[in-house]
Image (tube, grey):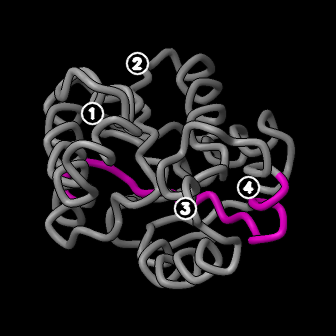
Amino acid sequence: MGQPGPRHVILLGFMGSGKTTVGRLIAERMGLPFVDTDRCVEELAGMTIPEIFDRAGEETFRSYETRALRHALDGPPSIIATGGGIVTREENWPLMTSRGVTVWLRVGFDTLRRRLADSKDRPLLSGDTTWERTRRLYLQREPLYRRAAAWVDGEQPAEVVADTVIKAVGSLPDARNDRVE
């Protein structure tokens, strides 16, 4: 099984796709640091993500998210779990692709809905948000996730997904531009 070169592995996917869980497993198996950009955002802002959304709005959150991404990419090679909307800011793409390999954890909407059904800490699912609105958001972001260098089936158990990501990333000679499914 190949190993990625000295660059970051950046996990992309909709909320509930398993980026944090899988990212921790990959980091442990590869002996690399794990970075969760959502936790970095909270540290930078001094607030939880729901508080940022409530007090300052989504655009401010996205600005913090880009800062957190830059900070993570300035560190040593690591496994980075991103927020589901990081793909919506065009400025994030050259940062990610020049400094790491992007991997989309592909998970169908029905599976995501089951995983997110009891979630209380996701601002985009709060208030009067309906599943139809969430589905539209998912469909809007899907073409952006497709820009990732590697696509991995995220519907499998986390351990299997982690192994598949490691294998996929290791098989890319220069994972910045080639896509593997």
Q: What residue sits right under mark 3 in the picture?
A: 104
| Residue 80 belongs to the span the image colors magenta | no
Of labels 1 and 3, earlier in sequence is: 1
At a point 14% along the width and 66% down the height, the residue shown is: 91
The N terminus appears in which quarter of the rendering? top right
At a point 15% along the width and 51% down the height, the residue shown is: 63
The C terminus appears in which quarter of the rendering? bottom right
Of labels 1 and 2, earlier in sequence is: 2
Asked whether, in this view, residue 49 is left or right of residue 43, the answer is right
Question: Mark 4 to mark 1: distance in Å?
Answer: 24 Å
Measured along the vertical axis of the image, is residue 125 above or below residue 19? below
Question: Mark 1 to mark 2: distance in Å?
Answer: 17 Å
Span highlighted in magenta in the image? 98-114
Q: Nearer the viewer, mark 1 or mark 2?
A: 1
Q: What residue sits right under mark 1 in the picture?
A: 41
Q: Decide: marks 4, 1 in contact (CB < 8 A)? A: no
Q: Nearer the viewer, residue 33 or 31?
A: 33
Q: What residue sits right under mark 2 in the picture?
A: 33
What element does badge 3 sit on? Answer: strand
Q: Position of residue 145 (x, y in %)?
A: 48, 72
Kind of residue at disc 2: Pro
Q: What residue sits right under mark 4 in the picture?
A: 154
Q: Nearer the viewer, mark 1 or mark 3?
A: 1
Kind of residue at disc 1: Val
Please rate how many residues cluster around mark 4, counting C-alpha atoms within 10 Å: few if below 14, some from 14 to 19, many from 20. Answer: many
